[in-house]
Amino acid sequence: MLVGAIKTLLNKVDAQENKITELSSENQKLKDEINRLKGEKGKPDIAKNKDDKKDSDDKKKGGKNGGRGKNKNAKEIEIHNTEEKMSKKDLPKDAQYKGTRDVVIQDINFNLNNTKFIIHKYYSPFLGKVFEGQLPPEYKGSIFGPGIWSFVIQFHYEARMTQNLLFKILTGLKVKISVGEISNMILCHERFEEERQNVREAGISRSDFSQIDDTGARLNGKNGYSIAVCNQFLLIIIQVFQKIERLY
């Protein structure tokens, strides 16, 4: 009799405990809904801790988190160099060939690349004129090549890299350059004016419409205006000072 009564009592306690848990969960959901309607946040849903042992087993089995060192995009990567790794002299005499496996490693090569141009000169006594070889167009007007120009301008404007940081990187590569010369590269828009003009004309000529606007501007302490041109081809508004005038 006593044992049966205890079992009945324990069953009722378990049932009441389950009921309390269910009611508490429902009560919390109602509170969260009320807070949501008030514009407040409810109780955060905190994820359970990961099972480190299970993750370790998955890696060993090559499961979802496994495959360390493998590149899933290896077939899409352009290959520049190929090396074979295995020397027969390191193998025992009875070693049997069992095929190959490919490992694609991505890397960059950023080195100093100076060029010395030897300009030959000739003089014609009959014409009284000197003839000499010409530098390629991309090397004219500067002691720095197009690679350094591209690096400075791209990393300054796209990566927001400061002039001092650019100076440290370039001098670290043993480029003989000063902070002032880097500043001149960033501010020297004339070098790219022809290319910019060609881009603007091509974008305008290919479009059925263009939106043009102007805004006030100051240059060298003088009032003027700048004109912005935009259409579906000119994805970024080209803002160029086309004419600076005094406004009196």
Image: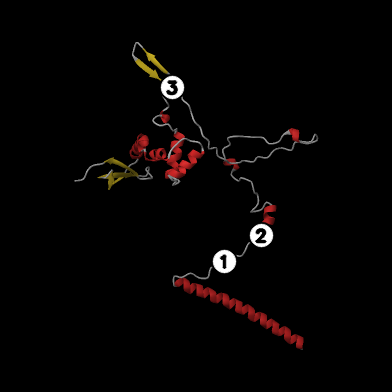
- Give the CA separation, mark 1 to mark 3: 72 Å
Disc 3 vs disc 2: which is toward the camera?
A: 3
Residue shown at 41% from the left, 37% from the top: 181
Residue under label 2, please give it: 52
Location of the N terminus by quadrant is bottom right
Identify residue type, mark 2. Answer: Asp
Indicate which disc, 3 or 2, sits on the residue closer to the N terminus: 2
Coloring applied to the structure: secondary structure
The image shows residue 171 at horizontal and vertical percentages of: 49, 38
Residue sitting nearer the eye, 101 or 123: 123
Disc 1 vs disc 3: which is toward the camera?
A: 3
Secondary element type, mark 1: loop
The image shows residue 19 at horizontal and vertical percentages of: 61, 79
Residue under label 1, please give it: 46
Q: Is 88 positioned to the left or the right of 194 in the image? A: right
Identify residue type, mark 1. Answer: Ile
